[in-house]
């Protein structure tokens, strides 16, 4: 574990380095876990994450056209507020499922 708390949030891979995974702990995790990730997040895009070995207790919520902070591109037609709401709804659904 890093001394930098932000490193703990970036659990999949460093930007632009999908071969340097930080996912070993996610393979054996037993605690129900939700990961909200923007579809354009450089720390792990859907096509990269699809190949990761993740524990069955992990649920992924992909935030449409979101970057690492869930901000969409203007041309996507989505707003940051919509993406934050999408993430919040995923959290509500996840907690309700526990």
Image (tube, rainbow, N blue to C red):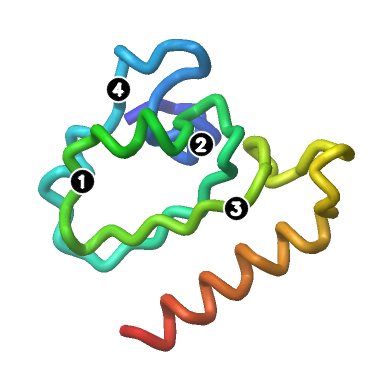
Marks 2 and 4, the one that precedes in the sequence:
2
| Sequence-wise first label, 2 or 3 | 2
Residue 48: x %, y % from top left:
37, 29
Name the residue tied to disc 4.
Answer: 21
**Disc nearest the viewer among 2 and 1:** 1
Task: Name the residue carrying label 3.
Answer: 63
Answer whether labels 4 and 1 touch (C-beta < 8 Å): no
What count of labels does the image hold? 4
Q: Nearer the viewer, residue 52 or 13?
A: 52
Q: Position of residue 85 (x, y in %)?
A: 71, 68
Kindly identify which numbered label has been placed on residue 22: none
Residue 19 appears left or right of 2: left
Mark 3 surroundings within 10 Å by alpha-carbon count, few (fewer than 14), some (14 through 19), many (20 or more) = many
Tell me whether the residue at label 3 lies in contact with that at label 1, contact meaning CB atoms closer than 8 angstroms: no
CA distance separating discs 3 and 1: 19 Å
Disc 2 and disc 3: Cα gap in Å? 23 Å
The numbered mark, 4 or 1, whose residue comes first in the sequence reads: 4
Please give left or right for residue 84 compared with residue 51 in the image.
Answer: right
Disc 2 from disc 4: Cα separation? 18 Å
Q: Earlier in the sequence, mark 2 or mark 1?
A: 2
């Amino acid at each position: 574990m890093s001394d930098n708390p932000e490193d703990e949030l970036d659990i999949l891979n460093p930007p632009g380095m999908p071969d340097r995974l930080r996912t070993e702990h996610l393979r054996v995790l037993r605690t129900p876990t939700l990961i909200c990730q923007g579809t354009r997040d450089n720390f792990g895009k859907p096509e990269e994450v699809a190949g990761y070995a993740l524990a069955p207790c992990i649920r992924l919520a992909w935030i449409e056209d979101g970057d690492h902070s869930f901000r969409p591109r203007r041309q996507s037609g989505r707003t940051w507020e919509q993406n934050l709401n999408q993430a919040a709804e995923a959290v509500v659904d996840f907690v309700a499922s526990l």
